[in-house]
Image (cartoon, grey):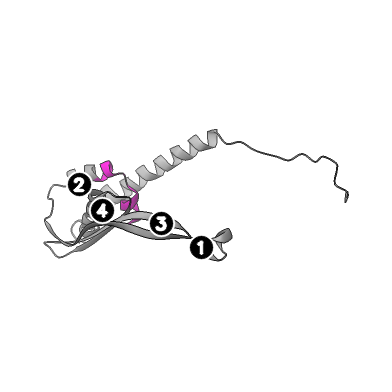
Amino acid sequence: MGVLAKAALTDLEDAFAALNDTPSFDWVRPPETGLVMVQGRAGGTGQPFNVGEATVTRCTLRTDSGETGVGYVQGRSKRHAELAALFDALLQSPKLSARLQTDVVERLAGLHERRRAAASRKVKATQVDFFTMVRGEDPKA
């Protein structure tokens, strides 16, 4: 689900267009947008605190063959949530699961990792290393 949620909408659209037989489905819960509270921890392990709210879109669908798919994505894209839920349902199909795992999920994970690495290299290129020089004014020295 994380790969589908983090994938670019255009990549999901391309993967969906590549499917030969697109299934029909009924909505269990149509796409809806709301807020979730994001929590953090002081120092990573300390007391939890509320960082703020994040916009999330979710939906649930059931294919005609009976698989139920759920999609949760950050942001307001109802289409993104719909495609994530549809792929979630299709990944439960015994005849499609292995092919979709390779053709869609692994490919999307690779695209995400390459984009993350490119962004990391771009940030690394502008990194500034700060250091402190000893001034010799420490009375303990």
Mark 4 or 2 closer to N-term?
A: 2
Residue 81 badge: 4
Name the amino acid type tagged 4.
Ala
Distance from the alpha carbon under mark 1 to that under mark 3: 12 Å
Residue 53 badge: 3
Mark 2 or 3 closer to N-term?
A: 2
Residue 26 to residue 11: above or below: below
Tell me if mark 3 has few (under 14), some (14-19) or many (20+) residues whose alpha carbon lies within 10 angstroms of its own: few
Asked if the residue at tag 4 contacts the one at tag 3, i.e. Cβ–Cβ closer than 8 Å, the answer is no
Q: Which residues are magenta?
A: 1-12
Residue holding disc 2: 16
Q: Looking at the picture, how far across and down is residue 89, in whole percent?
A: 21, 59
Residue 53 visible within the image: yes
Tell me if mark 4 has few (under 14), some (14-19) or many (20+) residues whose alpha carbon lies within 10 angstroms of its own: many
Distance from the alpha carbon under mark 2 to that under mark 1: 39 Å
Q: Which of 138 and 71 lies nearest the eye of the viewer? A: 138
Distance from the alpha carbon under mark 3 to that under mark 4: 19 Å
Q: Looking at the picture, how far across and down is residue 84, in whole percent?
A: 26, 53
Question: What secondary structure is marked by label 3?
Answer: strand
Residue 99 visible within the image: no
